[in-house]
Image (cartoon, rainbow, N blue to C red):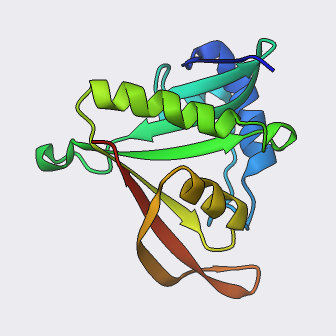
């Protein structure tokens, strides 16, 4: 399987909205992610603000990135979010997106990547650990989902 990685384009947005519908649920995110339109999606995720994975020309995953704060003292950190269409999970797409973004981030002077993941999202936690991420904190009982309290894990990886 040949995986192509590139920055997002507006023509990707409909498929990215579909991936969000397929990936995000009460085990993977604390709030339902729904998009009313492509324009709404574009306002939140402008072109070039995500890395896109394609297989046979079809968008199958993305890695979004943004600074965690607007502070100049925090610009060496980038917060990421990653989603791969369930049909393609476990095929190396997430790892390829992450490795590609790590190279880009280093070139831009980014030395730390961080992310948040629900404690109920065990597959994602194992994936991030295999990729070298470390738990740096845990927000205990941060969300109430499906009738129970769920921790929110803060994870990171140093790039230098």
Task: Give the residue drawn at x 75%, y 26%.
Answer: 15
Task: Give the residue drawn at x 47%, y 57%.
Answer: 133
Lateral position of residue 101 relative to residue 131, left or right: left
Quadrant that contains the N terminus: top right
- Image coords of residue 91 (percent x, y): 78, 37
Q: Nearer the viewer, residue 148 or 132?
A: 132
- Image coords of residue 99 (percent x, y): 51, 33
Task: Please say whether residue 57 is visible from this viewpoint.
Answer: yes
Quarter of the figure with residue 54: top right
- Image coords of residue 128 (percent x, y): 57, 55
Q: Is residue 41 above or below residue 115?
A: above
Q: Is residue 92 above or below residue 108?
A: below
Lateral position of residue 81 relative to residue 53, left or right: left
User: Looking at this rendering, what residue extends furthest in the left direction?
Assistant: 73
Q: Nearer the viewer, residue 72 or 35?
A: 72
Q: Is residue 150 above or below residue 2?
A: below
Quarter of the figure with residue 21: top right
Task: Give the residue drawn at x 29%, y 24%.
Answer: 107
């Amino acid at each position: 399987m040949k995986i192509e990685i590139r920055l997002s384009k507006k023509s990707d947005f409909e498929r990215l909205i579909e991936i969000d519908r397929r990936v995000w649920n009460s085990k993977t995110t604390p709030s339902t992610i729904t998009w009313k339109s492509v324009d709404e999606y574009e306002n939140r995720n402008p072109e070039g603000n995500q890395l896109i994975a394609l297989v046979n020309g079809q968008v199958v995953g993305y890695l979004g990135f943004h600074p965690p704060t607007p502070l100049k003292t925090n610009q060496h950190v980038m917060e990421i979010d990653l989603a791969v269409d369930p049909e393609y999970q476990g095929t190396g797409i997430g790892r390829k997106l992450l490795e590609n973004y790590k190279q880009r981030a280093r070139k831009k002077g980014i030395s730390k990547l961080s992310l948040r993941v629900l404690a109920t999202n065990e597959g994602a936690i194992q994936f991030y650990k295999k990729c070298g991420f470390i738990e740096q904190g845990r927000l205990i009982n941060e969300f109430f989902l499906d009738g129970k309290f769920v921790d929110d894990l803060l994870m990171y990886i140093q790039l230098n």
